[in-house]
Image: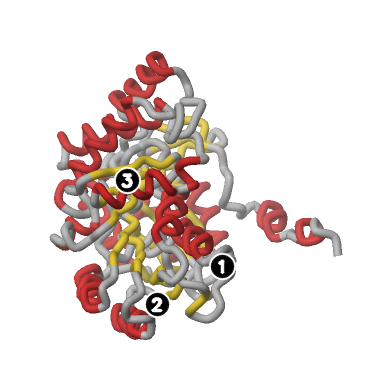
């Protein structure tokens, strides 16, 4: 069998394109924040992770331009060698202070961050204990820590998984590991598909009992939950008990890159041992300057977080009152579960044509029966945008018999 045979046999995307219901890789031609232009068609953006609406903020754009003028377009090296700028150091210091930790380390992408942390800290004879619904970046980091092997059952070369956000099962799983083995429990803070928030208080109790460390991925939590948008640990008042928090610049911080905060000794160890850091080009000047400007705005205007959450709560309440099956979780992600792939794709198309862009999540990205339209909201959405989305969702849902 030829290596490329599977590529020739992959027809699902072409079939969706032929039907006119292909929801992926549509080019944005203009971004005004809550309204974007896609293929000449203006739509309300209800699928972005631009939670505070800062990608179009004048101060963020100005910071990127000034950074390019001063430093050029790239660093032409890794952080380890010639790729560290004073901008990197300044942002690391500010993020550590903002998140209430001793130190911070930047990575070139959010996805890369987990691959820099997990296999660097968890080595032979040590264990990653991971939520089964964790983001793909954590899964990739786990696989590297496991020596590249696939998961087999619940235990494969130092990587074990527990049922989604089930702390009783977490304890069952972790209790079976060697009592004196070092362990790192890893979980999304806000799960990207459902918007569910991890049960961190219960996780902390398990970690204390079994002498484990905790890392939370706050990609969808920073700028969304917690005091002034400081994320999951702050949301629960468990900053000291949460050993490591990783995050991304591609959402709240309106840029590209990733970071981890924690104790200085741990960050220093990762900095000098992580291949994902040492052998990657460093974050570009414009990316870092944009993220720093976004952090400025977040610190000075925490009311943006309040506006974001008011918007998300309004939409969750509105969808629920219509009869849609939505998650009850209090974050900026509001999934509308349809439970049928064809209906999801058709509804996506109907919404797009009516002027609303959402994300279609289908198998294998979600389990059977959880096919959904994943909506997410921004602080810059106004009531006129939200009301229009609700009206269109009501009309299309009734037309298709999804709601009554």
- Using the image, determine if residue 101 lies above or below residue 398: above
Q: Nearer the viewer, mark 2 or mark 3?
A: 3
* Residue 64 coordinates in the image, percent (x, y): 37, 24
Q: Provide the secondary structure element on which disc 2 rests.
A: strand
The secondary structure type at the circle numbered 3 is helix
Marker disc for residue 363: 1
Q: Distance between the residues labelled 2 and 3?
A: 30 Å
Please tell me which residue is depicted at 34% across the width and 57% down the height of the picture: 217
Q: Residues within 10 Å of mark 2 (few under 14, many from 20)?
A: many
Left or right, 17 with reference to 395 = right
- Asked where in the image residue 208 lies, by quadrant, the reply is bottom left
Say which label, 1 or 2, has the lower sequence index.
2
Q: Residue at x 22, y 54 (%)?
A: 225
**Disc nearest the viewer among 3 and 1:** 3
Residue sitting nearer the eye, 110 or 107: 107
Q: Which residue is drawn at 57% across and 52% down?
A: 23
Query: Comparing marks 1 and 2, which lies closer to the viewer?
Result: 2
Q: Residue 90's image quarter?
A: top left
Quadrant (top left, top right, bottom left, bottom right) of the C terminus: bottom left
| Residue positioned 49% across, 47% down in the render | 275
166 displayed left or right of 306? right
The answer to whether one can see residue 373 in this image is: no
How far apart are labels 1 and 2 at the CA level? 21 Å
> Marks 3 and 1, Cα distance to the nearest angstrom?
40 Å
**Residue under circle 3?**
268
Report which residue position mark 2 lands on.
162
């Amino acid at each position: 069998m030829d290596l490329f045979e599977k590529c020739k046999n992959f027809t699902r995307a072409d079939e969706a394109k032929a039907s006119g219901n292909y929801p992926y890789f549509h080019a944005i031609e203009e971004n005004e924040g809550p309204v974007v232009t896609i293929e000449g068609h203006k739509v309300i953006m209800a699928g972005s992770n631009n939670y505070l609406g800062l990608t179009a903020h004048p101060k963020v754009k100005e910071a990127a331009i000034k950074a390019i003028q001063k430093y050029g377009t790239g660093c032409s090296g890794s952080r380890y060698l010639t790729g560290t700028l004073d901008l990197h150091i300044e942002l690391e210091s500010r993020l550590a202070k903002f998140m209430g930790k001793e130190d911070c380390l930047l990575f070139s992408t959010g996805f890369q961050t987990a691959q820099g942390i997990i296999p660097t800290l968890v080595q032979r004879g040590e264990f990653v204990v991971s939520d089964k619904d964790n983001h793909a970046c954590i899964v990739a980091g786990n696989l590297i820590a496991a020596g590249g092997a696939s998961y087999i059952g619940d235990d494969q070369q130092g990587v074990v998984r527990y049922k989604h956000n089930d702390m009783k099962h977490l304890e069952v799983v972790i209790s079976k590991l060697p009592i004196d083995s070092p362990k790192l429990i890893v979980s999304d803070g806000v799960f990207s598909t459902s918007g569910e928030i991890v049960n961190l208080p219960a996780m902390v109790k398990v970690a204390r009992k079994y002498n484990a460390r905790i890392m939370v991925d706050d990609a969808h939590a920073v700028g969304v939950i917690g005091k002034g948008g400081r994320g999951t640990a702050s949301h629960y008042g468990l900053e000291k008990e949460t050993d490591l928090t990783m995050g991304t610049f591609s959402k709240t911080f309106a840029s590209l890159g990733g970071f981890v905060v924690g104790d200085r000794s741990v960050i220093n160890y990762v900095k000098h041992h992580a291949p994902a850091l040492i052998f990657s080009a460093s974050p570009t000047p414009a990316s870092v300057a944009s993220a720093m400007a976004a952090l400025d705005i977040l610190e000075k205007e925490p009311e943006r977080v309040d506006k974001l959450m008011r918007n998300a709560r309004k939409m969750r309440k509105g969808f629920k009152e219509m009869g849609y099956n939505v998650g009850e979780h209090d974050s900026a992600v509001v999934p509308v579960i349809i439970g049928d792939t064809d209906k999801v794709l058709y509804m996506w198309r109907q919404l797009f044509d009516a002027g609303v862009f959402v994300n279609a999540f289908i198998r294998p990205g979600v389990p059977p029966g959880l096919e959904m339209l994943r909506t997410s909201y921004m602080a810059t959405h106004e009531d006129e945008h939200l009301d229009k989305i609700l009206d269109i969702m009501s009309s299309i849902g009734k037309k298709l018999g999804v709601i009554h």
